[in-house]
Structures are given as structure tokens and as C-alpha cells.
Image (cartoon, rainbow, N blue to C red):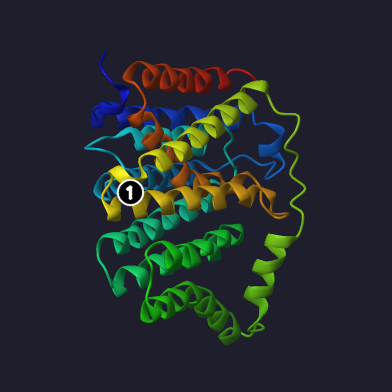
Amino acid sequence: MVAITRQTSGLAILILLTTIVLCTIRLQLHPFAAESAVCSNGVPIWECIVSAVLLFATAIVVNRTAVKMGILGGFGTLPVSLYGFIACGILLSPQMLTASAAGLMTALGIMFLLRVMHIFGDKESVFTGTLFLGVAAVIYPPAAVLGAAIPIAIFVAPLNIRQTILAIVGWVLPIAAVSYVNWYLGGEITETVVGMWQQITEHSNIPLSPLPIVTMVIAAVVAILILIGVIMSISYRYTLLVSVRKCIEMEVLLTMVSIAAFFMPGCNITILPVVSVPVSVMLAFTLERLNNRWANYLYGGVVALVIIHLFIY
């Protein structure tokens, strides 16, 4: 049986683009309660197009990260389609531009941080990675939870003193820059930080229920696959190169942090493209290490659920 984990690039891209287009059409025609609560107005066409481009770019970055960092055993394109399923197939925020931009910044940030696991003492990647994560936090404040990547990297890599300082400076710099511009234009210098804090801590009032049963089933399947992936990462711990093992450990921890973001008061479905970055890599890691038959069944099941989800409101 041909493994779905070895799907061609053309097929993966086709699945991703089809998922984005169909889910965007569903959002425009029949939004769920959790989606319409974010924004009751429709999404402009230009915003849909720009967001689709950003989502596509994010999926490519996620896939490149998984392959180049050795998280996948060889060349593969599975994270491309999986990112589309998680970022768009469960729920799609009407704030598409914000969500997709924050997702791309997160993907770039994690990619650069994982490079540090392969290149000891790499200061440039640390700074660049945390800079992108800081930009993601400015774009969508609840994404600031991925600032936890800094202590995770300090623990996993581990980072030296210079790298740690650069990581903190890189993450704070975008926030400081926006605060300075706001102050220069006549606002309060603390206005940006206060506004971000309010968006994180104030309740979003987004109803997460009632949701279609298919939504909850997809979320449950994803959660189970992540759990299997965590168990596999422990099982394969001593059979991998040290640098690859560190990358997988960091992805596991970032996945846990991302999922925990849903329990933040100000979090809503706009964070899904951000959370999908580490989650899609973990799902690809899990499916690649399962028996081909089981991997095909599980992947096919997720595809079927996403398709059913388009027609059940």
C-alpha cells in the first residue's frame, strides 16, 4: 500500500488550496456561531485572496521546517495539507488577514529557532526567530503565548547567556518599536502594551458551543494523534540524532503551549492558524511513524471529516 506520507508536492498543494477555497466559501455562506461572533460582516474578497496567499506561504514554511530539521524521516509534503486542515478545516476566523499573518510570523519564528538545535551557538537565528514571534504577538496579542519558546529553547538547546539576551531582545523589539511609534504620534508609550494585555486577559465572549459534532470529532482525532506523537517522541528518543531529538522535543513543548492558549480569556478562533504551525508538524511526525495502512486510514478519515464539515452547519 502506497503511504500517504509520501504524497507528491502537487497533490499536497492542490489539497491545501482546495481546503482554503472551500472553507472560505463556507465561511461566507454559512458561518458557525463561533465564527460569526468574531465578525458579523462578510470578509472582503481582497482579504480572502491575501489571506489565502499567506496561509499557502505558511504551509510551505511549516513543511520546509519539518523536512530540513529532520523531524520527518525524509522528504515529505504531509504538513502542507495537514496545516490547511487544522488552520481552516475546523473553524475559520473572519479575521482572516490577522490570523494568517500571525500564523506566518509564527512559522518563520519557529523555523529559525529550530536551526539553533543544529548549529551550536547560532546567535543570528535566535534573534531572528524571536523577532518573528514578537511580530506575531503584535499582530495578534494572544499569540504572545509562544513567547514561551524562549524558555523552552533555553532548556532544550540549551542557549548560552548571549543567545538568551538576544532572544529576549528579539521578542521585545517589535513591541517596543510599535510603542515608540505610537508615542511619537502623540499616544501614550504604554498604550500598546496595555492594549495587548487587555486583548489577552479580557474575555472574548466567543461562543464555542453549540458546535457541529463533526467539529468536535475532528478536534478529538487531532488530540489523539498529538498524544500518540508525544508517546512516539519518547519512544524514539534515543534512536535519533541529538539535534533532531531536540527539534522534536521543542515541537512537542510548543504544541502543548499552543493548545494551552485556548484557555486564555482573550483567545478565540483567530489563533487557529498560529496553533496549527506546531500541531501540523506533530501530526505529520505521528503519521509518518505509524504503519502505512493505519496512517492512510487516519489521514483519509481526517479528509472525510473535513469534507463532511463543509456541509453540516
Disc count in the image? Answer: 1
Residue wearing tag 1 = 61
Is residue 212 found left or right of 286 in the rendered image? right
Three-letter residue code for mark 1 = Val
Is residue 137 found left or right of 239 in the rendered image? right
Residue depicted at x 53% and y 74%: 175
Residue 256: image location, x then y, percent: 55, 48
The relative height of residue 142 versus residue 1 in the rendered view (above or below) is below
Q: Quadrant of the N terminus?
A: top left
Residue 132: image location, x then y, percent: 42, 64
Residue depicted at x 63% and y 84%: 189
Is residue 198 found left or right of 143 in the rendered image? right
Residue depicted at x 50% and y 39%: 87
Secondary structure at badge 1 equals helix
Structural crowding at the residue carrying mark 1, measured as other residues with C-alpha within 10 Å and reported as few (<14), some (14–19) or many (≥20): many
The relative height of residue 234 versus residue 210 in the rendered view (above or below) is below
Nearest the eye: 11 or 69: 69
